[in-house]
Amino acid sequence: MRDLRRGAVTYSLARLLLLNAHGAQLTLGVHAASLNSVATLPITVINTRMQTADPSQRKGMVGTAAEILQTEGFSGLWRGIGPSLILSINPAITFLVFEKLKGTPELCVTLACPLALTQRRRDGL
């Protein structure tokens, strides 16, 4: 009976450590994607405004940025940050899955084999 309790404690501890590792990697992925969104969104906003402007009224990147700053203020460069931050969850999940698969090469081979076989069948090999 004592060994069973020790096993349960060991399992609980291992499970807790694994959950924390997954949580840490997911958190790192969310932070990285969020930082990327915050850093690149002004360029994306300027680019979108330039593409949607009437061709006769296009002012270039600096002119478009100046117009946004004059009409909407500094926060206008980060218009749409909310949806962008929500969409940063997808790269975080991708990062987590990549890190987990990277640590288990046999799983990568198992997952890649059906794809490789399908490709070889398509190629006639």
Image (cartoon, rainbow, N blue to C red):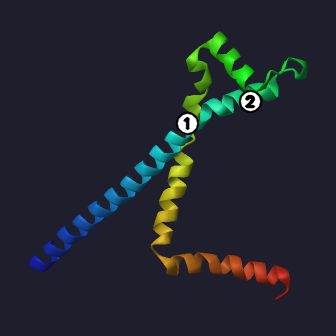
Q: Residue at x 55, y 50 (%)?
A: 91
Q: Which residue has dot 2 on it? A: 48
Proximity of marks 1 and 2: CB atoms separated by less than 8 Å: no
Residue 87 place in picture, x, y as percent: 57, 41
Residue 123 place in picture, x, y as percent: 84, 82
Q: Residue at x 14, y 72 (%)?
A: 5
Q: Given the current orientation, which residue lies at the most extreme top position?
A: 71
**Residue type indicated by callout 2:** Thr
35 left or right, relative to 59: left
71 left or right, relative to 12: right
**Residue type indicated by callout 1:** Ala
Q: Residue at x 29, y 64 (%)?
A: 15
- Counting every numbered tag in the picture gives 2
Q: Which residue has dot 1 on it? A: 39
Q: Residues within 10 Å of mark 1 (few under 14, many from 20)?
A: few
Q: Residues within 10 Å of mark 2 (few under 14, many from 20)?
A: few
What is the secondary structure assignment of the residue under circle 2? helix
109 left or right, relative to 43: left
